[in-house]
């Protein structure tokens, strides 16, 4: 049953997902191109000085990409469910409704995790061409919250779309924006904060159940 | 159960977000730019001069309240303002029995300011090792950067590979000097915009402080023999033409030491109660005196010392900061705490909680009562609504906003 | 005969707007039950409550003995549900959607589904979104049949269908229901199709139940009479005898459950000449309009 549900979700998001993978790869290629150009025109020494001593953020093009991916995947996955109340079909399936909802978002969660992991590996590889481990570690730790925010944006967008009542949606949206802004505004994170934010992003998957509850209760 | 925990998470999300953003927007509206006064010590009248934001006529005051104009201030602080006085041909010939020579004035005028965020700083642990005696007028950036981990390694920028020979040379030399790898702290000024290079002060893994630089391509490394029980929080290398001291050490308990050129002998500054997480440390020196200030958001404590760091005078002043303003008092009733992830006193993002103290209990109780009324209106029994009440009791306005916006789950429908 | 569906004292409000009050009915196993009413009388609301997509303001709704709001997966598997407008996952193809649902239902039989699909002029890889409304209704029906449920809930199966597809839909349904002794709960606003199909009917109007009885009994006892009235200003009123009436110029039409003598006695008391009273035969649709009114 779970694999059938994943199959249905996959059918909805596959093209969007491939497009997002493509967009990600383009962005990473752009960063790599930029790096090679900086290396040429600033000279390696100048590039290092700018990055190590002045904190030149040469990798910020990736900053909003995971956020965008999370939002897009949630939209293509859940707006067909809300269109004509198609979610009724899913909730009528012979299984626990909350479990069904969690299983639905588990697919996006898995795909996003894989994609973001891939982004981290590629960043590691392309930064590692020009820079030693200290800089690679700096780049990865600086971009880590930007990757985690993609998971949070996916869960929150899903919850916003599945919320059947516009008034409740309008309440949820500003808090979701504030929550996501936190991930994008932090820098030089201590381990305890980033652990908390990873935990909070994962737990935000629960929000979809509250929206699903409103849907099921039929509050219009 | 799941739906209930979903609502619970929603409530906590709102509390988390509001406790950051509501105080932020509140203070964007009400925060005043309250600047600390600048405190000077006049070598002419041997008195403090305090400059606040006032007009040119009332440029500064002395501790007795006497006001001075800018011109008067400049003549009272001739060393600080020597260029202006030279221009106006008003620089005195001598002071305290010493002849005033412009080069000597300039070389003796020193300033040092250390902010809490400088101490709590995130830095990539790679540094350029300058050639200290290149024979050139200007310093040049080297082609490699070093790290001190299991050994001292130089990494070539162009090829991003370790320069084996140089690394081996330095590592062997450091080993010979009983440097214990890896380094715990490396302090230096990785810039070519300095008069000369003193290299780096490096704390080894056994808390011994070494002075490491490169002279004519060869390693230079000296154990400073500075006691290894200082609990160093921060070091800054000064590289001043005065060559009185190499730099400054700040320890976690808030002691400040200068590392003198006299065989790395430590000079302890006569400071008390320096909170390195909140106070700004400022040192201004001239030919005769040192003025050392600790500045917090509502207080400045300044000592003036002679050149041997013996206190000659003290000055203290307090003022109302934003927290003590009427907006601050109102905030302390409304906000039981505020949360900042980015704090001006740190370059790290972290949980920076600020608890309002006893006055916030009133607000918390009022909001708890309001929540109780709300639950009555929603026909939620205490048995089902206790969590909402506890949440508001702890988080005050934030919890109340959350409970107000997010209705309770109907028990029958879970 | 056990009750598959039991609705007890169901009352529902949308905000302050009353949809229905103290609604009671039951559906017995093996019967074909029609919920008939004009648009906006709460048919879909009832179905939503029945399927657990709406919490009623008060009252109870049981399906196979379970509270409809908290149906167990096992019970949901016994209920086939056609959403108003034949909504299905339109991003799936004929093959994909069958494969998808088959994983959820242990009694899944794909044969009736593919049999029905074979009648459509489409390939198996065709997406539902690229099909006509009629074709989609067959897909939705085929899926319900393949699910092999004990109770079929069909919300306005006729929506958007032309006569051919409506007939196809019902023919299939009848054949299936009779062969397998299934219980069917159906709503529609096109009454004529259901004439020879329903066992029981529940006719509702805004806020009230008008008729709840076997369809045969309804057709037998609900009568239409026409007669002349003395002058065009003549007025009738609704009561126990006259369920509904129309007056056009000097001709009056009344609808009643009463026997002819009872009606005649009543009309006599209004000094109407009984000699002009004549019974007019009705189709189910006539009867439906008769009881609910044209407006």
Image (tube, grey):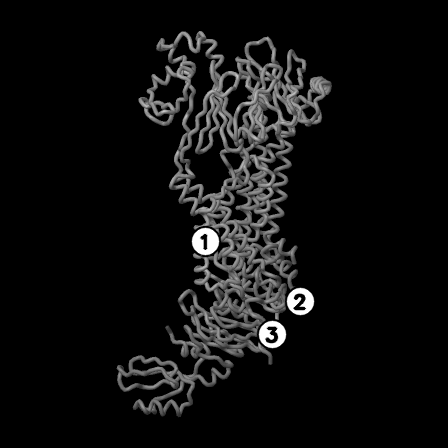
**Which quarter of the rendering shows the C terminus of chain C?**
bottom left
Above or below A187: residue B386? below
Q: Would residue A198 appear left or right of B167 to someone viewing this image?
A: left
Counting from the top left corner in percent of width and height, residue B104 is at 48, 10
Q: Is residue A22 above or below residue B182?
A: below
Which class describes the residues within 10 Å of circle 2: few (<14), some (14-19), or many (20+)? few
* Residue under label 3: C182
Give the alpha-carbon distance from disc 1 to disc 2, as whole Å: 59 Å
Q: Are marks 1 and 3 in contact (CB under 8 Å)?
A: no
Q: Which residue is mark 2?
A: C107
Q: Are marks 2 and 3 in contact (CB under 8 Å)?
A: no
Of residues C222 and C43, the one nearer the viewer is: C43
Q: Which mark is residue B365?
A: 1
Instruction: State the residue in front, A88 or B184.
Output: B184
Local crowd size for mark 3, using a 10 Å CA cut-off: few (<14), some (14–19), many (≥20): many
Relative to B382, C244 lies left or right:
left
């Amino acid at each position: 049953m779970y694999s059938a549900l994943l199959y249905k979700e996959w059918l909805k998001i596959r093209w969007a997902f491939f497009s997002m993978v493509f967009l990600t790869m383009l962005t990473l290629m752009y960063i790599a191109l930029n790096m090679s150009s900086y290396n040429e025109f600033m000279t390696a020494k100048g590039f290092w000085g700018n990055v190590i001593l002045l904190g030149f953020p040469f990798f910020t093009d990736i900053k909003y990409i995971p956020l965008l991916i999370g939002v897009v995947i949630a939209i293509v996955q859940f707006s067909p469910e809300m269109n004509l109340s198609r979610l009724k079909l899913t909730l009528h399936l012979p299984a626990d409704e909350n479990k069904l909802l969690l299983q639905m978002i588990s697919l996006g969660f898995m795909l996003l995790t894989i994609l973001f992991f891939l982004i981290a590996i590629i960043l590691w590889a392309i930064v590692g061409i020009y820079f030693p481990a200290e800089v690679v570690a700096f780049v990865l730790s600086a971009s880590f919250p930007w990757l985690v925010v993609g998971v949070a944006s996916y869960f929150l967008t899903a919850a916003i779309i599945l919320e059947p009542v516009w008034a409740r949606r309008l309440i949820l949206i500003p808090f979701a924006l504030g929550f996501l802004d936190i991930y994008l505004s932090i820098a030089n994170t201590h381990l305890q904060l980033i652990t908390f934010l990873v935990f909070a992003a994962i737990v935000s998957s629960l929000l979809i159940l509250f929206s699903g509850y409103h849907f099921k209760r039929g509050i219009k | 159960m799941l739906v209930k925990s979903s609502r619970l998470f929603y409530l906590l999300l709102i509390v988390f977000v509001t406790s950051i953003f509501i105080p932020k927007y509140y203070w964007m509206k009400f925060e005043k730019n309250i600047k600390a006064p600048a405190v000077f010590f006049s070598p002419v009248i041997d008195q403090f001069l305090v400059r606040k934001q006032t007009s040119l006529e009332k440029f500064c005051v002395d501790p007795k309240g006497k006001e001075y104009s800018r011109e008067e201030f400049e003549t009272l602080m001739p060393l600080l303002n020597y260029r202006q006085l030279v221009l106006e041909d008003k620089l005195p010939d001598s002071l305290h029995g010493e002849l005033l020579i412009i080069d000597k004035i300039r070389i003796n005028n020193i300033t040092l300011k250390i902010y809490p965020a400088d101490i709590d700083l995130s830095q990539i642990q790679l540094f350029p090792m300058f050639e200290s005696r290149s024979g050139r007028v200007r310093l040049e950036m080297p082609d490699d950067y070093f790290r001190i981990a299991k050994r001292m390694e130089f990494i070539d920028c162009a090829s991003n590979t370790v320069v084996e020979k140089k690394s081996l040379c330095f590592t062997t030399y450091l080993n010979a000097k009983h440097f214990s790898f890896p380094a715990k702290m490396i302090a230096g000024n990785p810039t070519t915009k300095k008069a000369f290079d003193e290299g780096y002060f490096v704390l080894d893994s056994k808390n011994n402080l070494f002075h490491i630089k490169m002279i004519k391509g060869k390693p230079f490394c000296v154990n400073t023999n500075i006691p290894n029980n200082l609990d160093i929080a921060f070091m800054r290398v000064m590289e001043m033409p005065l060559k009185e001291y190499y730099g400054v050490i700040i320890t976690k308990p808030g002691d400040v030491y200068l590392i003198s050129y006299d065989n790395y002998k430590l000079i302890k500054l006569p400071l008390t109660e320096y909170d390195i997480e909140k106070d700004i440390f400022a040192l201004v020196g001239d030919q005769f005196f040192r003025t050392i200030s600790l500045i917090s958001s509502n207080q400045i404590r300044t000592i003036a010392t002679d050149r041997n760091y013996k206190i000659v005078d003290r000055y203290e002043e307090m003022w109302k900061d934003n927290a003590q303003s009427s907006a601050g008092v109102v905030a302390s009733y409304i906000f039981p705490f505020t949360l900042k992830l980015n704090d001006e006193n740190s370059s790290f993002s972290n949980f920076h909680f600020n608890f309002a103290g006893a006055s916030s209990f009133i607000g918390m109780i009022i909001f708890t009562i309001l929540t109780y009324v709300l639950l009555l209106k929603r026909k939620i029994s205490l048995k089902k609504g206790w969590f909402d009440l506890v949440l508001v009791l702890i988080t005050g306005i934030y919890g109340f906003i959350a409970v107000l916006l997010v209705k309770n789950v109907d028990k029958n429908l879970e | 005969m056990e009750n598959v569906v039991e609705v007890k004292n169901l009352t529902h409000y949308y905000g302050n707007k009353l949809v229905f009050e103290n609604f009671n009915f039951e559906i017995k196993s093996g019967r074909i039950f029609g919920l008939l009413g004009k648009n906006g009388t709460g048919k879909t609301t009832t179905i939503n409550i029945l399927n657990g997509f709406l919490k009623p303001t008060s009252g109870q709704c049981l399906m196979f003995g379970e509270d409809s709001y908290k149906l167990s997966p096992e019970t949901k598997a016994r209920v086939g549900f056609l959403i108003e407008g034949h909504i299905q996952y339109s991003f799936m193809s004929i093959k994909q959607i069958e494969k998808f649902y088959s994983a959820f239902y242990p009694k899944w039989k794909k044969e009736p589904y593919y049999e029905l699909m074979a009648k459509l002029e489409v390939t198996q890889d065709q997406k539902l979104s690229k099909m006509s409304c009629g074709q989609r209704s067959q897909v939705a029906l085929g899926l319900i049949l393949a699910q092999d449920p004990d109770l079929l809930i069909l919300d306005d199966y006729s929506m958007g269908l032309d006569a051919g597809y409506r007939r196809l839909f019902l023919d299939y349904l009848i054949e299936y229901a009779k062969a397998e002794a299934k219980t069917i709960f159906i709503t529609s606003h096109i009454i004529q199709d259901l004439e020879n199909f329903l066992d029981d009917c529940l006719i509702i109007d805004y806020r009230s139940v008008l008729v709840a009885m076997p369809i045969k009994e309804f057709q037998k006892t609900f009568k239409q009479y026409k007669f002349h009235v003395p002058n065009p200003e003549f007025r009738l009123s609704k009561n126990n005898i006259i369920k509904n009436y129309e007056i056009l110029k000097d001709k009056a039409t009344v609808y009643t459950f009463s026997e002819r003598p009872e009606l005649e006695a009543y009309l006599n008391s209004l000094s109407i000449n009984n000699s002009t009273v004549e019974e007019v035969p009705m189709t189910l649709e006539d009867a439906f309009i008769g009881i609910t009114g044209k407006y």
